[in-house]
Amino acid sequence: MSRTQPVPVLTVDGPSGSGKGTISRLVAERLGWRLLDSGALYRAVGYAAGAEGLDLSDAEAVTRCAKSTKIRFQAAADGGDIRVIVNGHDATDELRTETAGAAASAIASIPSVRQALVDLQLGFRKAPGLVADGRDMGTVIFPDAPFKVFLTASAAERAKRRYKQLKEKGLNVTLGALQREIEARDERDASRTVAPLRPADDAVLVDTTGMPIEAVVAKVFAVVRS
């Protein structure tokens, strides 16, 4: 495509547990577009930093880790969720834990880490189009995206969703603790000085509380089709 006709992008931003991952994947499949799970990139770096025993508050060390970590997405052999390969290791399951989420949130507040991952994210913008799932896709990474959605849901609803996911994986978690972690992460993400979590001015807000997945997909899909 020419410069006057850039590859179209749909950004899907929102807090943890709002359904961004599932909705983005389903919409991308329906559109036949590429998918960028930006949160997985931050989780992958946080995971790699942890594997190296780094102090997540050591900006210089974590930035070096962000630049050197090899991350790739691989289709699952059984047709399930995309696998995330970190430095040659399939870390998909580890990246879905709340520990990985907290690490991602911590390092995402480091400007040099965010900058190290910007070019990697921009590289996903290829024909026929891209669905970009994250927290600052519409505000920072793809501000020129023609289609933007901000998904949200109550903290209680998001905690229930996460609880169900983690229990299905056999993990020992409590609903109350998950809700407290989600609320703390919301506060941290919204108050950080670098790319705080907020809807883009031109984003369509969708509250997914109590909505079935199919209904949310239809709403997001309509944004592109409109």
Image: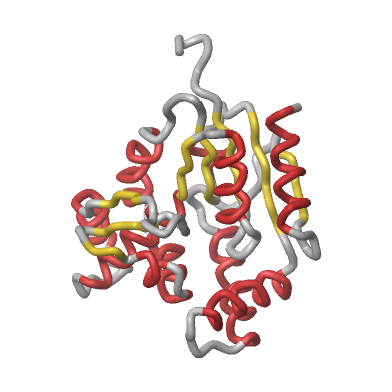
Residue 30 in picture, x, y percent from top left: 61, 39
Above or below, 154 against 34 in this view is below
Outermost front residue: 78
| Residue drawn where x is 72% and y is 28% of the image | 225
The location of residue 114, given as percent across then percent down, is 38, 48
Residue 77 seen anywhere in this rendered image of the structure = yes
Seen in the image, is 167 located left or right of residue 102?
A: right
The answer to whether 103 appears left or right of 134 in the picture is left
* Rendering coords of residue 54 (x, y %): 23, 71
How many numbered discs? 0
Which residue is more in the foreground, 187 or 209? 209
Q: Is residue 215 left or right of residue 61?
A: right
Query: Which quadrant: the C terminus?
Result: top right
Residue at the (65%, 72%) spot, across then down: 161
Question: Quick one: which residue is furthest to the right in this view?
Answer: 210
Colour scheme of the picture: secondary structure
Res. 188 image quadrant: bottom right
Q: Dividing the image into 4 quarters, which one contains the N terminus?
A: top left
Residue 109 seen in this snapshot: no
* Residue sitting at x 53%, y 47%: 133
Coordinates of residue 77 in the picture (x, y in percent): 36, 57
Q: Note whether 131 is above or below 209 in the view shown.
A: above
Residue 51: quadrant of the picture = bottom left
Q: Write the residue at 21% across / 75% down.
A: 53
